[in-house]
């Protein structure tokens, strides 16, 4: 009942699966299965009621009957070229034989940002800023002296954050007979986010039916859904979650008298040179008011299937799946300056349309036969999935307000500078599949799987590929020599297989593109003549990424209720897509072309322990503990010249190391005296930091040669990848009361806290963290010397971004979910016409134990190469819900 999305409901389901929520209402989640096996995208393949989808499920989680996660090659190989990142099979609810039953679920609750930065108030900021200007030998701005307005003390976090709320209503109707059943449900979900201007709505209707007549069984699953997403406004200059921290409290949200200008007619508070504050931080509240964005989606997804029993143990299945999605984006930006140094744009309207269609055709023959202690099963089939999408974008500028000064967009013809683009794509994936299973007396089990896939997005020589797996299991406990009474079931298993990944592929990516442009001038004149330019270099050798996985596992159970599953795996991915630098003389403007050049390796251990007491009567409970430890390593990067690494920001991806490890200068405290600085020399007597003064950061030389080189003296100082992850799920019931909770922990990763770097970088004018006091000779603190806009080289070294000062321990332990429920007595309910009713209270993210100083240690990262970068993202939310389930 706690989950607000299908992705959330997967959290803690099984070891080896990491779910990272964006926090933003409607923002979805990123799911990694057994680590990072690619640079291009790590999303798993979803099978929803038999329909293949690469998109994270976005329907009502209360419609879900079961979720199965396929992690190893043996289970996933039947899906071939799309299974390298794992497969998640979702089955929605069906009706059951019996009278019509109506079920309902009503939930409502509140959302809050659970943690805030402790920032300086107006008086603290003014005092600190005065000191910083004085340290730099600069005049103190009048905004901090004669023009200081004590009435301005803006808490930008308070202004931006609010208490959000959730409303969730679901009603279902189900029933059936011996030969048919039905399940219908409707859902409305509304989430007003905990920040200004953010919200999400979802409405959906589902109908699942099955019928049977003689040898034929048939059915369908259909979903109709509509969503509206109102995201937070942002632009290339403003990140709302960092600018609310940086904007000084001496600036008001809005003051038409003091701030209104021709380019800022509404008087939004912004930095001004030598007045109020010379900051370039943006006014986030102004942007939310001036920029309106709405995203709408209408989706149809479903399938129709027919099973025909041909002979005893042999049946044919036809599965027809389809998905059609219609997306619409509407945006409008009114004139108005929101940041010093950024001119006010003219009124601009944008509208984009994106339509997507996919159809799946599958034919399979299934065999199941038993001969005494021998049981065999097999499946063979053909699959064809087609895809098509269309994109249309349009923009107009120069809109004028009406007579009341309001931009109402009632007349789009007012605008000028029309701009429109469009393109369309079609592609398809074809597959031939086969699997055979043999079971001898539940003692020896063998499975072989083969799939041959073809993909139209690849060039002629690479369109087809073969994928396979082989697995076996030995139930040791069924051997005559086995006599361990306390461990009544014990099974050893192993598998090996090869899977593919196509998530990175786009149609026509293997072809070169040349566009005409009027950019060429010949001779001494200035006349432009028609010419052509490369916009995409051809790479006809593009192919699937391939992942080979070896898995060894042991599972067992005891007579008293303990069970366990342990797995060790090695996954090696080859032909990983990466970009290869090319000379500018090629004339290419489309960026470095992608090639299958890199290779990766993941090794991991997974453990799941479950205890369910056998003889529990009044008080029943169970507990499951999951543990995962995965190490990834780059084993090849292709031909990237003389380098053996990819550098992106402060993270380096290097052969022999994990993806995106932090590669920065390593610090060693603060110089307290000039004598320490003078003594810090290399073997030749050269000072490592000749410009340093007492109070400056001491950096460790990696070369042993002075002075400190900002490139050569960097080193690896931490990984964004956790050493291990663990989860604990507890469920209990006593009479009519139930309790469930989920704890989740991560240990051993490093996060680059960019918001803290921006706050503690006192070389520019913005707000600062409360309690951050720069070092002085009379007050030796843990923070180095500082000054605003200083030319002091020692101070400049103190605010370098690429140092371990900004790396923090990302370990945490979080109470992810907890729910307390009470089920009413059935005898009492029957008197009022109900069969069952239950009330509950639930919470998400009620507490987090961590040393991380940012909003949230559970970050999604910027990209695979900067997995551990906190760039100011939407944090996980604290949610308190109450609700009721009923049926009659």
Image (cartoon, grey):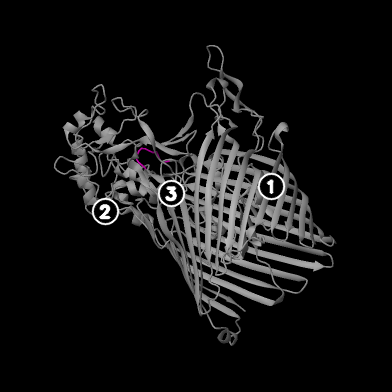
The mark nearer the N terminus, 1 or 3, is: 1
The answer to whether residue 789 shows anywhere in this view is: no
Q: CB under 8 Å between callouts 3 and 2?
A: no
Q: Quadrant of the C terminus?
A: bottom right
Q: CB under 8 Å between callouts 1 and 2?
A: no
Q: CA–CA distance between discs 1 and 3?
A: 43 Å
* Viewer-side residue, 65 vs 688: 688
The mark nearer the N terminus, 1 or 2, is: 2
Q: Residues within 10 Å of mark 1 (few under 14, many from 20)?
A: many
Query: Residue lying farthest left?
Result: 778
Q: Which residue is mark 3?
A: 873
Q: Magenta region, mostly helix, strand or loop?
A: loop
**Which numbered disc covers residue 470?**
1
Q: Residues within 10 Å of mark 3 (few under 14, many from 20)?
A: many
Q: Which label sits in the foreground, 1 or 3?
A: 1
Query: Residue lying farthest front?
Result: 481
Q: Is residue 816 above or below residue 579?
A: below
Q: Which residue is mark 2?
A: 153
* Viewer-side residue, 658 vs 439: 439
| Residue 295 included in the magenta stretch of the image | no
x and y, in percent, of residue 266 in the image: 37, 49
Drawn side of residue 423 relative to residue 729, left or right: right
x and y, in percent, of residue 515 in the image: 62, 27
Q: Which label sits in the foreground, 3 or 2?
A: 3
What is the span of residues highlighted in magenta in the rendered image?
339-344
x and y, in percent, of residue 471 in the image: 67, 49
Q: CA–CA distance between discs 1 and 2?
A: 67 Å
């Amino acid at each position: 009942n706690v989950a607000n999305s299908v992705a959330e409901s997967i959290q803690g389901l099984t070891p080896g699966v990491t779910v990272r929520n964006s926090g933003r209402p409607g923002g979805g989640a990123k799911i990694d299965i057994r680590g990072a096996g690619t640079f291009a995208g790590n999303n798993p393949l979803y099978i929803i009621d038999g329909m293949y989808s690469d998109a994270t499920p976005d329907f009502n989680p209360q419609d879900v009957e079961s979720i199965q996660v396929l992690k190893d090659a043996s289970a996933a190989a039947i899906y071939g070229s799309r299974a390298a990142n794992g497969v998640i099979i979702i089955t929605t609810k069906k009706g059951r034989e019996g009278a019509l039953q109506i079920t309902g679920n009503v939930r409502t609750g509140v959302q809050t940002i659970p943690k805030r930065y402790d920032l300086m108030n107006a008086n603290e900021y003014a005092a600190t800023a005065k000191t910083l200007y004085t340290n730099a030998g600069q005049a103190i701005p009048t905004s901090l002296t004669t023009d200081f307005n004590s009435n301005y003390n803006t808490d930008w976090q308070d202004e931006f954050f609010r208490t959000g709320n959730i409303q969730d209503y679901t009603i279902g109707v189900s029933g059936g007979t011996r030969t048919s059943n039905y399940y219908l449900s409707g859902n409305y979900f509304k989430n007003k986010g905990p920040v200004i201007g953010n919200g999400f709505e979802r409405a959906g209707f589902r109908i699942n039916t099955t019928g049977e007549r003689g040898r034929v069984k048939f059915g369908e699953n259909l979903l109709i859904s509509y969503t509206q997403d109102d995201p937070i406004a942002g632009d290339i200059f403003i990140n709302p979650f960092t600018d609310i921290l940086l904007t000084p409290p001496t600036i008001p949200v809005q003051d038409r008298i003091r701030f209104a200008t021709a380019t800022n007619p509404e008087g939004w508070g912004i930095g001004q040179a030598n007045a109020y504050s010379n900051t370039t931080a943006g006014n986030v509240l102004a942007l939310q008011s001036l920029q309106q964005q709405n995203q709408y989606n209408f989706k149809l997804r479903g399938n129709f299937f027919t099973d025909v029993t041909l002979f005893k143990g042999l049946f044919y299945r036809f599965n027809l799946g389809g998905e059609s999605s219609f997306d619409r984006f509407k945006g409008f930006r009114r004139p108005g300056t929101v940041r010093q140094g950024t001119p006010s744009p003219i009124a601009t309207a944008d509208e984009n349309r994106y339509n997507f269609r996919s159809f799946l055709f599958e034919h399979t023959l299934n065999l199941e036969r038993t001969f005494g202690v021998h049981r065999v099963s097999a499946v063979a089939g053909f699959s064809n999935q087609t895809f098509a999408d269309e994109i249309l974008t349009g923009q107009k500028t120069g809109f004028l307000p009406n007579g009341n000064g309001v931009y109402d967009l009632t007349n789009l013809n007012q605008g000028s500078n029309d701009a429109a683009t469009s393109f369309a794509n079609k592609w398809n994936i074809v597959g031939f599949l086969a699997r055979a299973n043999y079971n001898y007396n539940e003692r020896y089990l063998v499975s072989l799987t083969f799939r041959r896939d073809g993909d139209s997005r690849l060039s002629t020589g690479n369109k087809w590929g073969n994928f396979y797996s082989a697995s076996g299991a030995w139930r040791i406990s069924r051997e005559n020599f086995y006599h361990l009474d306390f461990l009544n079931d014990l099974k050893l298993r192993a598998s090996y297989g090869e899977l593919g990944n196509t998530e990175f592929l786009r149609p026509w990516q293997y072809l070169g593109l040349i566009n005409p442009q009027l950019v060429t001038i010949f001779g001494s004149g200035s006349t432009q003549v028609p010419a052509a330019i490369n916009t995409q270099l051809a790479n006809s050798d593009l192919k699937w990424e391939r992942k080979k996985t070896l898995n060894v596992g042991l599972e067992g159970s005891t007579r008293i209720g303990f069970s366990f599953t342990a797995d060790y795996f090695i996954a090696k991915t080859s032909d990983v897509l990466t970009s290869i630098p090319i000379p500018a003389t090629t004339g290419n403007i489309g960026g470095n072309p992608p090639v299958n050049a890199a290779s990766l390796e993941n090794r991991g251990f997974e453990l799941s322990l479950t205890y369910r007491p056998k003889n529990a009567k009044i008080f029943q409970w169970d507990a499951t503990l999951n543990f995962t430890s995965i190490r990834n390593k780059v084993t090849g990067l292709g031909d990237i010249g003389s380098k053996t690494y990819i550098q992106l920001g402060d993270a380096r991806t290097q052969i022999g190391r994990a993806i995106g490890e932090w590669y920065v200068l390593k610090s060693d405290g603060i110089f307290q005296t000039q004598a320490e600085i003078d003594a810090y020399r290399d073997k030749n007597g050269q000072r490592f930091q000749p410009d340093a003064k007492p109070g400056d950061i001491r950096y460790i030389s990696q070369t042993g040669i002075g002075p400190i080189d900002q490139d050569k003296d960097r080193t690896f100082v931490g990984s964004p990848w956790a050493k291990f992850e663990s989860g604990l799920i507890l469920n209990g019931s006593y009479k009519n009361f139930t309790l469930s909770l989920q704890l989740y922990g991560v240990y051993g990763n490093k996060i680059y806290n960019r918001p803290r770097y921006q706050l503690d970088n006192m070389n520019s004018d913005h707000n600062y963290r409360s309690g951050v006091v720069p070092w002085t000779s009379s007050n030796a603190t843990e923070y180095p010397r500082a000054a605003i806009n200083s030319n002091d080289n020692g101070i400049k070294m103190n605010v370098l971004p690429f140092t371990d000062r900004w790396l923090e321990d990302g370990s945490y332990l979080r109470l992810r979910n907890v729910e307390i429920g009470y089920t009413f007595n059935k005898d009492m309910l029957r008197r009022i016409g109900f069969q069952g009713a239950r009330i509950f209270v639930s919470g998400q993210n009620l507490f987090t134990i961590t040393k991380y100083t940012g909003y949230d240690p559970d970050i999604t990262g910027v990209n695979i190469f900067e997995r551990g970068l906190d760039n100011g993202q939407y944090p996980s939310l604290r949610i308190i819900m109450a609700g009721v389930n009923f049926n009659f």
